[in-house]
Amino acid sequence: TQLLEQSPQFLSIQEGENLTVYCNSSSVFSSLQWYRQEPGEGPVLLVTVVTGGEVKKLKRLTFQFGDARKDSSLHITAAQPGDTGLYLCAGEDSNSGYALNFGKGTSLLVTP
Amino acid sequence: ETGVTQTPRHLVMGMTNKKSLKCEQHLGHNAMYWYKQSAKKPLELMFVYSLEERVENNSVPSRFSPECPNSSHLFLHLHTLQPEDSALYLCASSQDPFPGETDTQYFGPGTRLTVL
């Protein structure tokens, strides 16, 4: 299994602050995905990054895939309470055509 | 009804009970998945079905038994579970991934299972 380490595990910030969360591995992934999971719901895909060095923006969220395709980061600008949730990164398991390897996630709380 | 639905949303059962979790997808996908989400652990893939055939079974104990009668429905039959099986069980579906291609999985809201 290709492990994905996410940091920090927990993050509590106030509305308007910026933050970055990280997803790291010693393995190379063909792509990485970021999901957000809200309490009582399943994960929802935010973005897929495929090319090393790729940067994708989704409104206030900026996703970056490392040049070596082993790590990724998610930066949120001016966080809002609606950003609260568990952020999960997932990479395709090279030994399986179907499996995604997930990190444990970063639990983000944004307070007004 | 849209997306991926799961019933029940919450389930409490004793170790000697038999129960089933149901998942239904309305997206026209050909692959369906069962995941287990426990506190402080990554999502664990349990089973994968593609075109109604099981293609992966990740060393899951036999007290969990999946069933996929058609491409829209997936069940997880539970019997003689242990307290450590308490978790959120998530169902997901995707179009029909080919090895080496990135596919998007759409998740249901999950069933919160508590085993007493």
Image: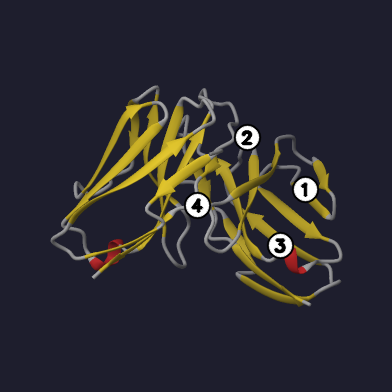
> Residue B106 bears which disc, if any?
none
Q: Residues within 10 Å of mark 4 (few under 14, many from 20)?
A: many
Residue B79 x %, y %: 18, 53
Marks 3 and 2 on same chain: yes
Give the CA separation, mark 4 to mark 1: 28 Å
Amino acid at dot 4: Pro
The chain letter under disc 2 is A
Residue B38 x %, y %: 41, 62
Marks 4 and 1 on same chain: no
Give the CA separation, mark 3 to mark 2: 20 Å
The residue indicated by pointer 4 is B109
**Left or right of A77 on screen, residue A71:** left
Amino acid at dot 3: Val
The residue indicated by pointer 3 is A21
Q: In which quarter of the image is the C terminus of chain B?
A: bottom left
Looking at marks 3 and 1 on the same chain, the residue that comes earlier in the sequence is marked by: 3
Q: Which residue is drawn at 52% across and 25% down?
A: B28
The chain letter under disc 4 is B
Residue A33 x %, y %: 64, 44
Q: Find the residue positioned furthest to the front.
A: B1
Give the CA separation, mark 3 to mark 1: 11 Å
> Residue A30 bears which disc, if any?
2
**Left or right of A77 on screen, residue B76:** left
Marks 2 and 1 on same chain: yes
Q: Which residue is drawn at 29% across and 61% down?
A: B85
Q: Which residue is drawn at 68% across and 66% down?
A: A84
The residue indicated by pointer 1 is A64
Marks 2 and 4 on same chain: no
